[in-house]
Amino acid sequence: MARPGAACPPPARRVMVAARALLFWALVYSYCGVCACIAGLRLLWSIGRRPGETFRWVVRENPPACLNDPSLGTHCYVRIKDSGLRFHYVAAGERGKPLMLLLHGFPEFWYSWRHQLREFKSEYRVVALDLRGYGETDAPPHKENYKLDCLIADIKDILESLGAQGYNKCVLIGHDWGGMIAWLVAICYPEMVTKLIVVNFPHPSVFT
């Protein structure tokens, strides 16, 4: 609330600010509208020329070259005894350095962390995991296989499997849905987490 006697902006200034804001959002929505029209016309053109090809599912024989970039790390697999699932992850950095475990969001996979793999591998053993149902990790068919209890247990089991490499705790980083899992792992198994970093997900208490 303005203090008594405080000067108010003159009407002309208020009108100018409102006009600038209106112009800005008009440009934003106009640009979005033009992009949507172009995309729609391209789709219609494709349907008209090749109706059978437009929505055909194409399976790649080989993954994109960027996924096999050696600068990102080494592709590894581990099978968890309790669930029987095979998990895929990419690891960068020397073994023996502190472990940094990265959990991606929805609907992503390990490649979302490509910049962090390159950035932190000089100081950490960086592991970017494909969560269950994503990327090259096994995808159980039933909904009950994706309950939070299962997802939390996955991270605990992954850390225990990495114990053979000398790890029993990590710097845990999660983004989006991976952030939710990271919060709960830190709450349920605090002894396994030295530091917790969560991006784009609030504390779980806001959902209770």
Image (tube, rainbow, N blue to C red):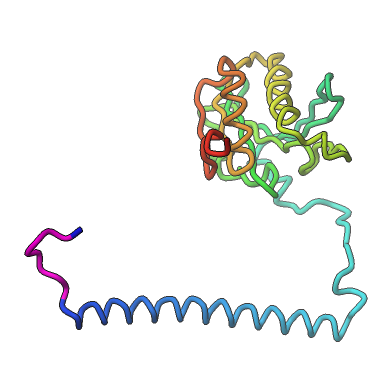
Residue 123 within the segment the image draws in magenta: no
| Vertical arrangement, residue 101 with respect to residue 25, above or below | above
Side of 137 where 99 appears, left or right: left
Depth order, front residue of 93/127: 127
Residue 4 within the segment the image draws in magenta: yes
Determine which quarter of the picture holds residue 174: top right
Side of 76 where 106 appears, left or right: left
Q: Which part of the image, by quadrant, shows the C terminus? A: top right
Image coords of residue 84 (percent x, y): 87, 25
Q: Residue at x 39, y 81 (%)?
A: 23
- For the image, the number of numbered tags is 0
Q: Residue at x 31, y 78 (%)?
A: 18
Q: Residue at x 83, y 40 (%)?
A: 143
Image coords of residue 36 (percent x, y): 64, 78
Depth order, front residue of 71/202: 202
Image coords of residue 138 (percent x, y): 84, 36
| Vertical arrangement, residue 121 with respect to residue 64, above or below | above
Which secondary structure class fits the magenta region best? Answer: loop
Q: Which part of the image, by quadrant, shows the N terminus? A: bottom left
Depth order, front residue of 65/1: 1
Start-end of magenta stretch: 2-9
Q: Residue at x 53, y 79 (%)?
A: 31
| Vertical arrangement, residue 164 with respect to residue 7, above or below | above
